Image: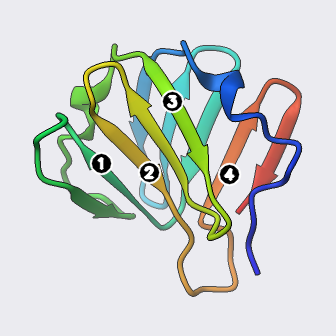
Amino acid sequence: MKTIPHEFDPKAVVGQSLELVTFTSNSVYFEFGDAFSVTVYASFRYRLSRDGGETTDTVPVPSSAVMSLVGRTLTGSAPDAAAVLALTFEDGATLAFSTDESPYESYFVSVGGLEFAV
């Protein structure tokens, strides 16, 4: 079963701003400054505003509006037992990374000195 390690401190990412979203043929890379990044190999969900509809993008991503989140600052982070890492931005927008049914990693996180695959 895929899990987020208990060493991950969700408060460590609060205050980070999404600076970069990079798309490749087999991943999407989200960089929140020097201290926090997520590389997605499966799918991710996002909501561009508090009242907006949720969108799911699956790698490879032919087009996406997720880059609209660039420049926004994180106000919350909530990992759960199902290995979902949900991020909340100051304006109510959200970005969530979750696992899929494959035996391979769905996403990779680097925060501070901690790195882990889920």
Q: Secondary structure at mark 2?
A: strand
Left or right: 11, with 45 as reference point: right
Label placed on residue 46: 1
Splitting the image into 4 quarters, where does residue 13 fall? top right
| Number of numbered discs overlaid on the protein picture | 4
Q: Which tag is nearer the camera, tag 3 or tag 4?
A: 3
The residue singled out by tag 2 in the image is 96
Label 3 Cα neighbours within 10 Å, binned few <14 / some 14-19 / many ≥20: some
Estimate the spatial distance between the alpha carbons at disc 1 and disc 4, rounded to whole Å: 17 Å
**Of 56 and 60, which appears nearest the observer?**
56
Q: Looking at the image, tell me whether mark 1 or mark 4 is earlier in sequence order.
A: 1
Q: Amino acid at mark 3?
A: Gly
The residue singled out by tag 3 in the image is 76
Residue 112: % across, % down = 81, 24
Label 2 Cα neighbours within 10 Å, binned few <14 / some 14-19 / many ≥20: some
Q: Looking at the image, tell me whether mark 3 or mark 1 is earlier in sequence order.
A: 1
Q: Looking at the image, tell me whether mark 3 or mark 4 is earlier in sequence order.
A: 3
Estimate the spatial distance between the alpha carbons at disc 4 and disc 2, rounded to whole Å: 13 Å
